[in-house]
Image: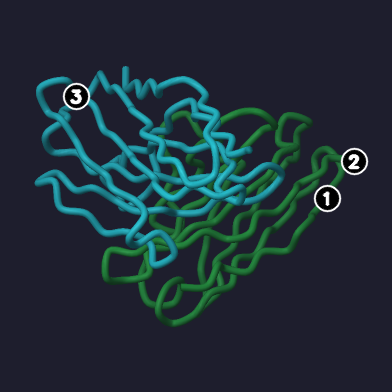
Amino acid sequence: QSALTQPPSASGSPGQSVTISCTGTSSDVGGHNLVSWYQQHPGKAPELMIYEVSKRPSGVPDRFSGSKSGNTASLTVSGLQAEDEANYYCSSFAGSSIWVFGGGTKLTVL
Amino acid sequence: QVQLVQSGAEVKKPGASVKVSCKTSGFTFTGSYFHWVRQAPGQGLEWMGIIRSRGDMTYAQGFQGRVSMTRDSSTRTVYMQLSSLRSEDTAVYYCVRDAGHWDFGHWGQGTLVTVSS
């Protein structure tokens, strides 16, 4: 099972919006509405930000939103804040009780 | 609240095995699914496998034959054992609970396993 494809880096100024893509195949991202997104600050464990493509766990700001079109999922962070600077990973169920992660995107707030 | 507390850092020699534990609290253990995910230094996340509520497992293809995941309901603890260690297995290993949405909802603090001669 191959990793999902994410851009290695993304950036934006405070207050702007940034979108991070996550491209897979019809076996994973395109085949299931089970894409999730994780935020990881240096030295910390990842934290769930989005599940089932576009749902937010309680406590996650509504500045974070998710969507999917075909084999590509996206995470949008609106109204960028300094604390949003982190690594972001997507993940998808890939069928047959298998999960796969993306390679990660480093988000820099300029 | 949900807590997953993992065992401490380990240093192992190539060819050895390591067993990482993950003690849980704050939720119904018997109905929960657990994943193991690892992260090599400076690298991304890698899914290793899942142990479901009835104790059946699915492992990622790259770990089959070397990894074993078990669970003990009496102590609310999940275990991951990795054998035939090599230097490329040096990583932080995370225990993760599925929050009920086929996701990685709750994470342990991670356990650093260093493989070095």
**In the figure, residue B23 lies in which quadrant?**
top left
Q: Residue A11 carries which label?
A: 1
Residue depicted at x 72% and y 29%: A83
Residue depicted at x 28% and y 48%: B68
Query: Circle 3 marks a residue in which chain?
Result: B
Q: Residue A110 carries which label?
A: 2
Q: Tell me the quadrant of the picture where the C terminus of chain B can be found.
A: top right
Please determine whether, in this image, residue A34 is positioned above or below residue B82: below
Q: Which chain is green?
A: A
The colour scheme applied to this rendered structure is by chain
Using the rendered image, report if marks 3 and 1 lie on a common chain.
no
Residue depicted at x 15% and y 28%: B28
The type of residue carrying mark 2 is Leu
Query: Circle 2 marks a residue in which chain?
Result: A
Label 3 sits on a secondary structure element that is loop
Q: The cyan chain is which one?
A: B
Percent of width and height locating residue B38: 50, 45
**Is mark 2 in CB contact (under 8 Å) with mark 1?**
yes
Residue labelled with disc 3 = B76
